[in-house]
Amino acid sequence: MPGDSAILEALALVTSPMMLLVIGLSVVGGIVVGAIPGLTATMALALLIPVSYSLPPDQGIAMMVAVYVGGISAGALTAILIRMPGTPAAVATVADGFPMAQQGRAGQAIGNAVVASFAGTVISGVCLVLFAPTLADFAVKFFFSEIVAVAIFGLTAVIAVSGKTLSRGLFTALLGMLIATFGVSTVDGISRFDFGNTNLQSGIGLMPMLIGMFAVSQLMKTTSDSQRPSQAHLDSGPIYPPLGDIVGNTTNYIRSSLIGTIIGVIPSLGSGVAGLVSYAQARNASKTPEKFGTGHVPGIIASEAANNAAIGGALIIALTLGIPGDPPTAILLGALMIHGVDTGPMLFENNSGLVYSIYFSLFASSVLMMIFLLAFGRYIAKVTRIPNRILSPIIFALCVAGVFSGNNLTFDLGVMLVFGLVGFLLDRGGFPLAPFIIGFLLGPLIEDNYRRLMSFGGLEDFVTRPISAIFLALAIASLLYSFWKRKSQAAVRA
């Protein structure tokens, strides 16, 4: 059969020494980029388009897929080690990853994050191979009301990352939604809260704000603290998560990967939202939800499995319909067009060999990513042993370089410092920072799509359109269940 021959040819191509070398080097490059604050997989892919064009289509696209996988996976490293999400996808990983590093369990945290990243990529890849047309049809049904409903469902993650300070978590989430309104509205073109500064008309940049809130605020906290938490000894050899961590989280792996895949299919949500939603659902399903946020392995697994699964989800809608699920896949589609490859339904008819090579490249990238990070995780984790007087200036220099490289604007450095101070003050006051990011990411989705809904439809769309009604029902059920569980735990403690 032609299909079988295309599969075998693609498999032979991807497993050839030259292709494995390209994929391996690209994975390592993606890891390096993803671990440096301010440098994202999107930026790396954009820079690689000219390189991709100089290679055969199979190698060029495989290179970009590998960078994509490595870049998303590596964001967990700095999130765990220094409370600095290397990419927005790793925001939820900070909640349990950094406490584990402070407890001297950085190696265990990295090991679990790597295996979860591998599992999420592979499971979403399987969904890509088996269910791409079905999931693409599902994504096409999303209109304004569906995106608003999904975003509202995502907001329920505020409960999961607020710990015992729910009211403060809600405050920081609302603050994040307010900050996200700065700049020119995408709906009517009206400028809001720019204070006469033209730099603010484009809004507050995600990476300067993210690095300031988490990294710079932590540097301020570390500098002001008189003592550094003691660190446990890291065992020699590669870091592997304990078998009990893997077996005990089988359901978590599957649930989080499926959540990430579905959210990845929906345009404009992305891996950061996938990680946060998955984290919330893992906490709701846990018998010990109070452990989340204290250095709990299931929290890391939920975040990393989902944000990597969003890769496969984004590729589903990109390859089948030609619709970019997120910024990296938008660049990937551009690279395919440069190579003269038409995306959409005809891609599977006219370039089935290339499609299968993308599938196998995704799987090969995830395997090589896991091998590399597990082999060198012990050395990476040793960053927690570096004295603050040496580590802090290095981290700050990386923050400055990463932020400035985004747009080459000193204004972004000011944004970073301002939000560093804001994050420091919120942290000192007992206000959790993760809800701020949830509000910042989801606020614009809710506002823009709600306003468009009011122009083209009405509130009745929320209940008359099945998908939006289901997600709103899930949001209400998640809220009620979370409050009931909190009340039950309070009664038990009393």
Image (cartoon, grey):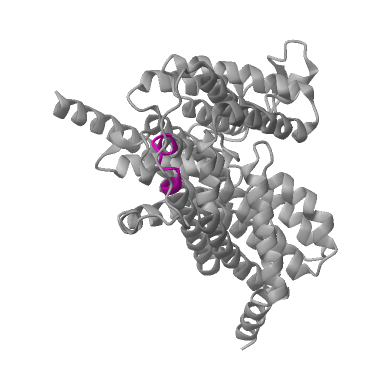
In the figure, is residue 340 to the left or right of 11? right
Q: Is residue 469 in view?
A: no
Q: Which one is nearer the viewer's eye here, 480 or 65?
A: 65
In the figure, is residue 42 to the left or right of 229? right
Q: Which is the main secondary structure of the residues drawn in magenta?
A: helix
Q: Which one is nearer the viewer's eye here, 218 or 53?
A: 218
Magenta span includes 105: yes
Query: In the rendered image, which quarter is residue 441 located in?
Result: top right
- Residue 355, image x and y in percent? 66, 70
- Residue 447, image x and y in percent? 58, 28
Give, as a single range, the part of the protein colored magenta: 99-109
Q: Is residue 282 in view?
A: yes
Q: Is residue 360 above or below residue 204?
A: below
Query: In the rendered image, which quarter is residue 287 located in?
Result: top left
- How many numbered discs sit on the rendered protein? 0
In the figure, is residue 412 to the left or right of 288? right
Q: Residue at x 47, y 62 (%)?
A: 123
- Residue 399, image x and y in percent? 67, 31
Q: Is residue 72 above or below residue 19?
A: above
- Residue 336, image x and y in percent? 76, 61
Q: Is residue 298 above or below residue 184?
A: below
Q: Is residue 469 above or below residue 61?
A: above
Magenta span includes 349: no
